[in-house]
Amino acid sequence: MRRLRPCAVILLALFGLATAAIPANSQKAPKLDKTFDIWLKDEVNYLITGEEKKLFLSLKTDSERNTFINAFWARRDNLPVTAANEFKDEHYRRLDEAKSKYGVHTDRGRIFILLGPPNAIDNETSGKIVFPCEVWNYTNLSLPGFPNSLRLLFFKQWGVGQFRLYSPLFDGLEYLIPQRHYDSGYGYDSELRNLIRSYMGIDFLMATQSVTAGTDQLESERILATLRDPAAFDVLRPSDKPRVTTTVSLEKLPFDADGFYSEDGRGNFYYDAALSVSPADLTFERSGEKLYGRADVFVTVRDRGRNVVAQFNDQLSLELTESEMQAKKGYGLSYAFSQLLVPGEYTVNILLRDYVSSRVGEKDLPVSLPPTGRSTPLLLAGRIVPLSLEAAAETGKADAARMPFTFGKSKVIPRMDGVFGPEENIFLYFEIYRQTADSGDYRVEYAIRDARQARVRSDGETLSLPAGERFLPVNKVFSPKGLADGVHALFVRVEDALSGTPILESSTPFTVSSAPRLPGSFSFEQDYRPSPESRYTELGRQSFFRRDFAEARRFFGIALSTAPGYLPAKVLLAKCHAIEGNDGPALDLLLPLAEEGVNDGELLTVLGSIYYGRKDLERTARYLEKAAELTAESVEVLNFLGSVYLEMGRKDKAREILSRSLLIRADQPLVKSLLESLGKIAPRTL
């Protein structure tokens, strides 16, 4: 995973004026009697669903409210045949204990109220290696459709304030370590894992990776989302009544997002993406005289085969005075990033979390990068501004940092929602790529159509590509003045001016709206700035997953020429050789590393695979044992190792290893069947 340093902050703020720890768009609730107010805010705040709360607040009399409360508890009574309401009694028992130990409005208090006391709590309060932490272990939850066991990590960053529930997806190891380092190269995460494992133990390390065995970071976040959403959690309650299954949605924090690609001049593409958030959809909290907020971004790029080819996160933090917040009232949030990709089909998954409210939003952007493109897509922008002379000079350098939406000597400020006021200008940007048969002169026709597809405006021009240039940037400005409010579409057609050969026919929608726009935006962006060896290893990995091994080896070779000891390039290059049947070069790369004691699970797994192909089962098992120790919850490695022991006739070891695999992930019918055939009934779950 590529962990980015703190992003470039263009304007230091995040959202408009609001009150502490309350959404900026929240409406003032009706005045309630103190008893009902306490019931709603302090007693059932983690149980009551949004629809129930809306109904309760609409009631006019105390009699109606008391009737509602009785019905609220009756609906949750698991054993209505008894005189007592066991669910209600247990809830208030947990509430009282949580209030005395942790406070009601804390992460630990919420989890205690929802799940009850953990089976075990592991404490690390010294703060020497990690911030003060607690790991709550649940081993028998018995909630339908929910993991039977959980390991929830709470941490107190910098040792102050309340314990916060840790997210393996958004927080990561760096936010547990007092002496963390930004701009860390490859291997820093591995160093942190080794450090934590040495001092804290394997169980603590696993709690930093996922909230339950056999899940990844994204699935862990979905489980945490269930614990944050009363409606989703309500579905999990044991009941003898039929239930409708539900899927936990992360789309609780709305945002707009879109992307754009352009060639890098070497046959690859820069993919730039931007997101925007309404100021009403983020919250903040007050501490002393300051207002604090934070948004977390997690981006995953997967190819058509669902392989992760790029992954990174970013943290957008701010600290504002009351006067600063007043001055920027009504500002929205925007964030942009850039990623280098080889031609192919991808999905860019963006997760955005508002740290204070813990609301999470999710978007998937499909990306298709053609091997021989004639043009980029159309990009609508609110502004196109020239770069400074210094910045423009940097963009022309080989392997220079790439700021998102920077093209040549210009910076494009995209308008993600596609909404423009009648007095604003609409900026259009795209690029035309020259082919050998082109004349170099291009006729460009523009047309604006309304919602009924009637042409309301048209324009055209002929543009020439300077000699020796590979692509032609096109900038066009339109005024929406005179267009009716509503949805329109901009159509663009490009053809060779001499031959008439069509080059581009495309359209993009936009909206004209007279409604007031946001007064500004607090803009963050993250450049693409990997080291040369990391850059070419990323490109090699993408080619590897496309099974273009020749191209992958070329990229890995460039990476190793830059940094001869770069481990990821060596391991992936060895995998290329092994798949192509060239075990010798693969072993030449990996054996010296293994003999030096390099602890890398992938390296050891590749060595095990090579020796398995050579029928050397003893060496295979030896390397896979080490790999399994380093990747303690990888069912793939465990199943591989178990099958090797089975081939060796070591049935007891095979049972042991395959049982471990099944404990991590229960939904493995083949493993379960194999264990049963070995004479042991597999355990159902943890």
Image (cartoon, rainbow, N blue to C red):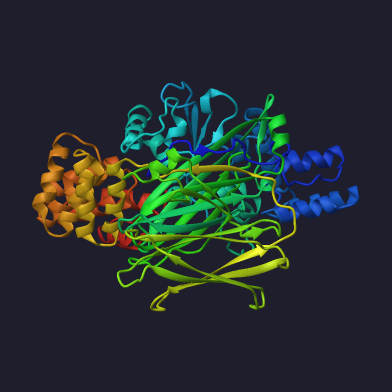
Left or right, 528 with reference to 649: right
Does any portion of residue 170 appear in the rendered image? no
Quadrant including the N terminus: top left
Q: Nearer the viewer, residue 410 or 35?
A: 410
- Rendered view: 414 above or below 462: above
Does any portion of residue 544 appear in the rendered image? yes
Left or right, 275 with reference to 633: right
Horizontal and vertical percent for residue 106? 63, 34
- Rendered view: 281 above or below 580: above
Horizontal and vertical percent for residue 61? 91, 50
Left or right, 573 with reference to 386: left
Question: Residue at the spot x=85%, y=49% of the render?
Answer: 66
Q: Nearer the viewer, residue 425 or 453?
A: 425
Number of callouts:
0
Horizontal and vertical percent for residue 475? 51, 59
Which corner quadrant of the image does residue 189 belong to? Answer: top left
Q: Nearer the viewer, residue 446 or 88?
A: 446
